[in-house]
Each structure stands twice: as C-alpha cells, then as structure tokens.
Image: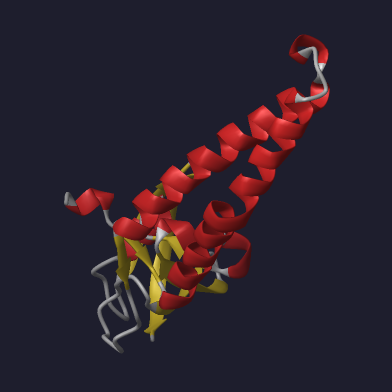
Amino acid sequence: MMMEDTQYMSQDKLDQLKAEYSDLKLEKISAIAKRIDEARQLGDLSENAEYHAARDEMAWAQSRVKELEHIIDSAEIVANTGSKIIQIGSSIRVKANKVEKEYTIVGAQEANPLAGKISNESPIGSAFLGKSKGDKVQVRLPAGVQEYKILDVK
C-alpha cells in the first residue's frame, strides 16, 4: 500500500466509519432496493419520481460503501504518544499575531477546523509536522504568509 494512501485516524473515528458501513450494507441498501422494487411495480418508470429518486439514492449508497471500504482498509490508527515532536495525534498551542490558538493534528477524515482539529494534509497541519516547542513555522495561506510560534506540544 502506498504511504500517501494511508488514512490516519483515531480508533473512535474508525469505529464510526465501520458502524456507518454496516448500517449502509446491512440495512439501508436493502431498504432502498425494496423501494425501487415497489416503485417498479407502479408501472411507467419514465415518469415515476419515486423510482428515480430511489435509484439515485442507491447509486450514492453503493458509492459510499466502496469509499468506506477503501478508507477502512487503508486506515492506520494514531494516538498521541506524548512525543515532544509534532506528529499526527499531537495537540499544540501556537501563537500568531499575538493570538494564541490550540490545534490537534488529525487525519483528513477527522478534520474539523472549527473545533481546532486540523488535517495533517492541510497547509497548516503539514507545516507543523516534525517541529517542536519553540520552533517558528511559516505557512503560506491564501491570505499570505503567516508565522506561528509553537508554545507547547502535548
């Protein structure tokens, strides 16, 4: 497996994805298939909105199942090891323009910038990887170059 194909995530996120996969595979797809069958029995399919909506939903569900299979198969669990070198799973406190911020570096599947969870693939997240407390990091953002000072690594 190629390294850039690895999906880094916590055990909780992997469990959520596995639950979604099971729900789709075991329940939702069979329920959609039943809706398609019922809509087919109504006759003229060319003007049957329920049939077309169910077919679209089935296509989405099957696509999502394949996506989830790929993500789960290429998942690598990360946990905060307590290292003072920033890696996936690290929580950091940084200062930029006299404003302190806290981030947790996570895999792309768990990224939620509003909650302070930034992806290791994002410009900011990737710039912090391998750095440690006291380092200054320059990140090129759409608004220009931003300099961050790393205050703490947990």
Q: Nearer the viewer, residue 105 or 102?
A: 105
Query: Which quadrant is the C terminus positioned in?
Result: bottom left
Q: Does residue 6 appear to the left or right of 36 in the view shown?
A: left
Q: Does residue 66 appear to the left or right of 29 in the view shown?
A: left
The residue at 62%/47% (across/down) is 30
Image location (x, y in percent) of residue 83: 26, 86
Q: Does residue 152 appear to the left or right of 98 in the view shown?
A: left
Taking the view exactly as shown, the residue that stands out farthest to the bottom is: 82
Q: How many marks?
A: 0
Q: Nearer the viewer, residue 126 or 109?
A: 109
The correct choice, above or below, for 66 with respect to 15 in the image is above
The residue at 79%/12% (across/down) is 44
Image location (x, y in percent) of residue 130: 23, 69
The reply to whether residue 139 is in sight is: no
The correct choice, above or below, for 9 with respect to 49 in the image is below
Q: Quadrant of residue 124?
A: bottom left
Q: Quadrant of residue 125?
A: bottom left
Q: Quadrant of residue 32?
A: top right
The residue at 33%/65% (across/down) is 128
Q: Nearer the viewer, residue 19 or 84?
A: 19
The reply to whether residue 48 is in sight is: yes
Q: Nearer the viewer, residue 130 or 20?
A: 20
The correct choice, above or below, for 52 with respect to 76 in the image is above
Image location (x, y in percent) of residue 65: 48, 47
Colour pattern? secondary structure
